[in-house]
Image (cartoon, rainbow, N blue to C red):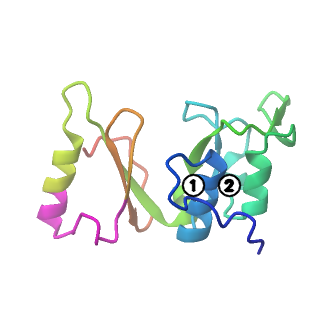
């Protein structure tokens, strides 16, 4: 595998979306794919079939050059974009994600801490839980496990 992406998340204050996607793929083994900029919507049909942990394929998705990467459900071409958001294919990656909101009177982080304490799960820097800040100021907590389908708010 190519090492041209090894500078991903090497302590820089701001990493590119491609660097972050490649870091998820290489360091965590996750399959990811592009989402429309600032949205949680795939840009092309069959998104789940195109998610990958291959750095070269990820480079195609986030390329600043105009590369054809798929088509919409209506058959229109979809091109690469360095501003695409990053979507995690939880099923391929063997990950469960809990989205903990901190807006509109919700206290998801406190709810996650309570749930973790009840279940005997350790949170914090030494835990086997990967956590990121969400755009709204909440937290996404990622746990290894079998995928589950739920539209229910846990936190």
Q: In this picture, is 11 found above or below 104?
A: below
Instruction: Tell me the tag on residue 115.
Output: none
Q: In this picture, is 32 found above or below 82?
A: below
Instruction: Tell me the tag on residue 51.
Output: 2
Label 2 SS: loop
Percent of width and height locating residue 84? 65, 38
Quadrant where the N terminus lies? bottom right
User: Image check: 128 left or right of 12?
Assistant: left
Residue receiving disc 1: 89
Q: Residue furthest bottom?
A: 1
- Closest to the observer: 71 or 134? 134
Q: Residues within 10 Å of mark 2 (few under 14, many from 20)?
A: many
Quadrant where the C terminus lies? top left
Q: Residue at x 38, y 41 (%)?
A: 151
Q: Is residue 129 magenta?
A: yes
Magenta stretch: helix, strand or loop mostly: loop
* Cβ–Cβ under 8 Å for marks 2 and 1: yes
Percent of width and height locating residue 119? 17, 66
Label 1 SS: loop
- In magenta, the rendered stretch is 115-130
Q: Residue at x 46, y 63 (%)?
A: 95
Percent of width and height locating residue 32? 62, 54
- Closest to the observer: 150 or 99? 99
């Amino acid at each position: 595998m190519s090492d041209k992406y090894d500078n991903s998340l090497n302590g820089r204050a701001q990493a590119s979306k491609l660097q972050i996607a490649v870091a998820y793929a290489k360091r965590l083994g996750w399959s990811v794919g592009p989402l429309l900029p600032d949205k949680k919507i795939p840009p092309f049909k069959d998104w789940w079939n195109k998610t990958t942990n291959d750095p070269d394929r990820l480079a195609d998705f986030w390329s600043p050059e105009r590369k054809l990467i798929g088509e919409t459900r209506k058959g229109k071409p979809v091109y690469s974009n360095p501003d695409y958001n990053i979507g995690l294919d939880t099923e391929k990656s063997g990950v469960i994600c809990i989205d903990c909101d901190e807006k509109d009177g919700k206290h998801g982080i406190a709810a996650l801490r309570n749930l973790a304490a009840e279940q005997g799960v350790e949170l914090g820097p030494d835990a086997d839980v990967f956590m990121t800040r969400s755009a709204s100021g909440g937290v996404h907590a990622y746990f290894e496990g079998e995928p589950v389908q739920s539209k229910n708010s846990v936190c």
